[in-house]
Amino acid sequence: MKSISRRNFLKGAVTLGGMVSVFPEILPSSVFGANAPSNRVTLGHIGVGGQGGGVMNGMLHLEETQILAVCDCFKDRRESRAKTVNDHYASKREKGTYKSCEAYRDFREILARPDIDAVVVATPDHWHVPAAALAVRAGKDVYVEKPLGVSIAENKLMRDVVRQYGAIFQYGTQQRCFSQHCGFAAELVRNGYIGELRSIDVIAPNGATGGKQDPQPVPDGLDYEMWLGPAPVTPYTTDRVVGGGRWHIYDYALGFIAGWGAHPLDIAHWGYPHIPVEYEGTGRIPEDGLFDTVVDWDIKGRYSSGVTFTLKPGGDKTTFTGTEGWVAPSRGGITASSESLLKVKIKPDEIHLLQDNHHYLNFVKAVKTRQTPASDIDSAVQSDFISHLGDICIRTGRKIKWDTERETIVGDTEAVRMMNRARRESWGLI
Ligand SMILES: NC(=O)c1ccc[n+]([C@@H]2O[C@H](COP(=O)([O-])OP(=O)(O)OC[C@H]3O[C@@H](n4cnc5c(N)ncnc54)[C@H](O)[C@@H]3O)[C@@H](O)[C@H]2O)c1
């Protein structure tokens, strides 16, 4: 079946409504081939700092895409990224086959453009769900950096919106395509090659402490109000916005329990698509300095099947242990209890999880075909729930019980309240 981009599909529908033939809209794509200008997935990039710049460069080198817009609160960042895009197309593409990439201060202007199919959200974490949910509501597909929301409620909201609008959602935990051995490890677990699963042990790099609190003038060219967005208003200081701040301040993030935890937890969920129903543990919330997300966490959990779970700091790895062996993938490699396990060839009639070896292209293809991409919304929501539940058990100092059916904490009113967070009214979506 011929694939058709959602933009063309929607355009066709609009045209039909106006009683004009739909065919002129579709024909050029099939005439010029899959990467014809009219068939390229058009992108807007929201947040083009370190990671956003990297994803943008990855998308830029795909024949299947055309970047039409970039947005950032820093004027110099958005302008230099737009220049990178325009210079690239000027040198690689024939004149007249691409449009200029524009730089925006306010991402809502990108969402209002009907010629943009999809957006990449690579802002700090506190903007992920508000920006991505608004994008989906504006008819866009979304590639959203990890971790997902800053609360359990935000995660649920994101999933509701994606389902309601039939949007394609790809989560930025790239290892589902870029680190193929992670998928292989998950296939070993799912197909019983380590016997009956007994435990999952996850490690992720520890968080940071410190950060200077003294207020400083907002730098020229930064729209700090937009940077803060749904987060509380606080005086500007460099360590909030550059350096580690955006990852380690609770107003904007959960710290590395989620920020880095997202990667190995995603693999845990891939190999065993459930989440623990009980959590207990300890951790430290630094009191000196600006950074106030949990560090030194030590979480123990249990799945409803009895499989045990731990989440600790130190490196990056997901170890699956079964009755007949173990396998431990990380983003960088894989180890196992025996060489023979690493040489297994998954049989055609067994469970196969790997879709693609390019995470960005996997998203672009999904936008065109409307098929579920490698890191879909359901797995993103579930794996990110684990970080939130671990964080809540540390903050309350109590055991947490999770009802997987109702998706709520049970028997602890304060903990239930912590499933949501107050957001600034102007950006509150929940
Ligand atoms: N997948 C990965 O391996 C990986 C690696 C690093 C970071 N990340 C994630 O990427 C995200 C960004 O991290 P980073 O290190 O690039 O941070 P960064 O601060 O370098 O970049 C974020 C950019 O978003 C911009 N921004 C903030 N609010 C915005 C808004 N409303 N509209 C437009 N732009 C806005 C900022 O000005 C900044 O330039 C984080 O969520 C982080 O967890 C993922």
Image: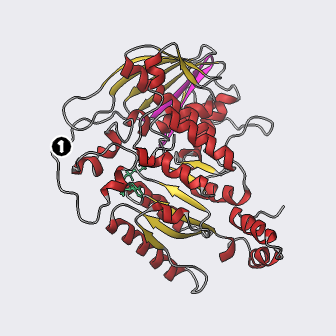
Q: Position of residue 397 (x, y in %)?
A: 37, 16
Q: Secondary structure at mark 1?
A: loop
Q: With 298 as the anchor, is 317 left or right in this view?
A: right
Specify the quadrant of the image occupied by residue 368.
bottom right
Do we see residue 260 in this rendering? no
Do we see residue 201 in this rendering? yes
Ligand 1 within 8 A of label 1's CB? no
Q: With 196 as the anchor, is 222 left or right in this view?
A: left
Depth order, front residue of 78/131: 131
The N terminus, quarter of image: bottom right
Depth order, front residue of 126/310: 126
Specify the quadrant of the image occupied by residue 126.
top left
Q: Position of residue 136 (x, y in %)?
A: 60, 53
Q: Position of residue 102 (x, y in %)?
A: 47, 73
Depth order, front residue of 81/428: 428
- Mark 1 Cα shell of 10 Å, populated few (<14), some (14-19), many (≥20): some
Residue found 79% across the figure and 40% down from its top: 348
Give the main secondary structure, helix, strand or loop, of the magenta stretch: strand
Q: Position of residue 132 (x, y in %)?
A: 53, 51
Task: Give the residues in magenta.
Answer: 316-334
Residue 21 position (above or below residue 330): below
Queried whether the magenta region covers residue 328, the answer comes back as yes
Residue located beneath label 1 in the image: 212
Residue 5 position (above or below residue 136): below
Residue found 59% across the figure and 25% down from its top: 407
Queried whether the magenta region covers residue 27, the answer comes back as no
Dot 1 amino acid type? Lys
Count the marks: 1
Q: With 301 as the anchor, is 211 left or right in this view?
A: left
Residue found 72% across the figure and 39% down from its top: 352
Q: Residue furthest front?
A: 425
Residue 224 position (above or below residue 208): below
